[in-house]
Image (cartoon, rainbow, N blue to C red):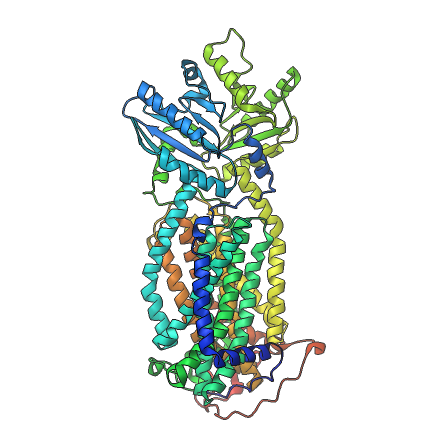
Amino acid sequence: MRDTSAPHPPAPAPGGLNGLLALAGRLAVRRRSVVLLLAAALTLLCALAGHDVSGRLVNGGFVPDSAPSARAQRTMESFGGGAPGFVLLARTRGTVDAPEARRDGVHLVSRLLTDPQVVGVDSYWTGSVRPRRAAPAGTDRAADALVRALRTADGHTAVVLVRLRGSAGGTRAAVDRLLPEVTGVRGPLRVDATGQAAALKDLEDQSEKDLRTAELIAAPAVLLLLLWAFGSLWAALLPLAVGAVAVAGALAVLRALTTVTEVSVFALNLTTAVGLAMAVDYSLFLVARYREERAAGASHDAALRQMMTTGGRTVVVSAAVVGAALAGLLVFPLYFLRSLAWAGLAVVALAAVTALLLVPAALSCLGEDRAGTDWFARRRFRGATEQGRWYRLAVLSMRRPVAVGVGGLLVLAALALPFHRAVFGLSDERVLPPTASVAGTARVLHTQLPAVTGSSTDVVLPHWQPESPRRLSELDAYASRLSALPGATGVRTVTGVYAAGRPVLSCPAHATDPAAVRVTCTDLAARHRAAAGTWVAVSGPASAYGPASTRLTRDIRSTGAPTAVRLAGPAAELADIKSAIAGRLPYAAGLVALCTLVLLALFTRSLFLPVKALVMNLLSLTATAGGMVWIFQDGHLRFLVGDFTVTGTIDLLTPMVAICLAFGLSMDYEVLLLSRIGEAHTRTRDTARATAAGLQAAAPLFTASAAVVIAVLLALASAQITVIKLIGVTVALSLLIDTLLIRPLLVPAVMALAGPVNWWLPSRFRRERPAVPPPVVPAPASAVGTAPGAPLDDRTPQAR
């Protein structure tokens, strides 16, 4: 971990950021006992403040409140319609028409209607009912064609569709109240639940189990890796202490946020993962710098000062860059993403501040003997920098920069190629393990009642009533056109039931029509008309978020209607989410890119190096996205990453979180590498030597950090939920690409090709660098990567 080719340059004169860091270091050392006690007290207080935060988080926030589908869904509450929050499957050994089964079914519906979140219930026994307007079960209900569709042909199973109102938090509370009461054995009925709200509840519960399992799996590996990276038990406990303070503080921040807005349950998972990753990185950067200074001959106090003004500066810039990556999520109008951004920003800031205060205080308490203890010192590289494996690898890359660069780009392009066929959707019960009750009930429902489980798009004609014959004719023609669209399996509205462009049942009914027609038409008129307007229900493909449903929604929007329409339903929500993300994505990407470029330009005093860092990260992320599609959309490597249900789509929002995390961690390692290269260039004024020496100094640090983070992420591959598995595998893949290809091979090759351009800065922004003292330890006779005795100038001109 040390650079023996020359001592580190003297610490800059106090002032600005360096002055603040030096002051923080002095305070932390002089008041070390106070700092440690305050850290412990703050952790305890924050843990108490945020102890109940998990019960206040919600699984939702995917659709912007201002989206057309959200407004249409609120309108659908006046009809008692829309996509059901959850579906109950009631099975009996006899028939659902038996008196006992009918009685218990009616009682079940009555209990559902007493809940304030329930806006409507459709059941075989009662038809469509709403609170305070419940229609009693009667013989005429059996004649209703819509009611008959809620029973299987063998008569053993009936369906209850429960529609809910309100936000994600209210929906989750209703599910928590109702499902324990209405599921299980109810007289002759066995009732099981499925549907979106029930799946989200199971998803949340299962994710908590998976994360606990992953923590148990990862804990031994993480501890061993920390011991190896830090060299002693005392030092290995530092990142855990920093992470504990940061995570506890972030939980208190999330608890405060829940009082003013809804916060996604995934913010809790992000807080833990990012808190641990940043704590390991920042602690490792500081401890490694301290030990390098001690190895170079500095005293204990001088090493702590130098650690703060050099390693501390790297920590501050890294936290700012990672924070900029997370801040991009604030641009999107989805509180799911915004709450993740706030959680990430809080834990990154707290990790940086805690590391800058806790690490020097702890090292000072340990004293110079224990602080410098490294149990594995004999197994680490201790020779001249030029003899290091990372140094030699960098020189090898710089000798053939064009070949290495082209080869690396071809590998990245091959990995990125599957991304062009990515199909994005949203998660449903199929992301749950096959053994989950919700998933099993959904499979039974799909098999026995496919018409009920098919996706539905709700078309609302706001403030438009079919009160005249002309309007009834317009609605009839419109419904016929909708039923003829590709993917539409049926249409229901006031004027009847339609399929394949023609009416199957025409309404209003005449007195001479059969009883079944009259009852069904009465039911349709009651369901599809309200003060808010007229409702047209379009049944579609089985997969609500598949490409066929997306095309159907697009065709519905382009089909001529009697008035302006609003669309609700899963496919409409997906379209609105895509539109919201596509509309804000350029702004989010621009904000992240601009902040990253400015921060790195100030840090490196160069215009080229920030652009190079951003491009390298984008190449890495594109390759990562391609690998994600190949694994999770196409279903490859399930034997390695764990089995999961292949749906043919990728969840739209989960990859954004994974890519954001990967970008932040990658930039964290980039800042470390650039800081070491910059220091080496200040000493040598030689780009090739500086790049190789910087990689030799930084690579052991970022590879050790990446190993710890990858161990945690790969433990998530044991998760039973596909989205959790996707995040872990995707971010781990990104770190592998970054540490094995981007940093050790492509970065040196690009640095060699750029030559002096690496350090170009307009004259007006230049400042004279301090004079560099002559090296105390002479470089070995054999140059980097050259044959023994070969002169250094045998390198390619670009490498100078």
Q: Hey, which residue is sitting farthest left in the picture?
A: 93
Q: Position of residue 390 (x, y in %)?
A: 44, 77
Q: Position of residue 208 (x, y in %)?
A: 38, 51
Assign the N terminus to one quadrant of the image: bottom left
Residue in front for this viewpoint, 332 or 114? 114
Q: Hey, which residue is sitting farthest top in the picture?
A: 512
- Residue 565 position (above or below residue 380): above
| Residue 624 seen in render | yes
Number of marks: 0
Residue in front for this viewpoint, 736 or 688? 736
Q: Residue placed at 45% from the left, 26% from the top?
A: 122
| Residue 155 seen in render | no
Residue in front for this viewpoint, 480 or 137? 137
- Residue 184 position (above or below residue 776): above
- Residue 673 position (above or below residue 98): below
Q: Quadrant of residue 74?
A: top right
Assign the C terminus to one quadrant of the image: bottom right
Q: Residue placed at 62% from the left, 76% from the top?
A: 605
Q: Hey, which residue is sitting farthest right in the picture?
A: 764
Q: Residue placed at 41% from the left, 80% from the top?
A: 365
Q: Position of residue 584 (x, y in %)?
A: 61, 51
Q: Position of residue 273 (x, y in %)?
A: 44, 60
The answer to whether 103 appears left or right of 75 in the picture is left
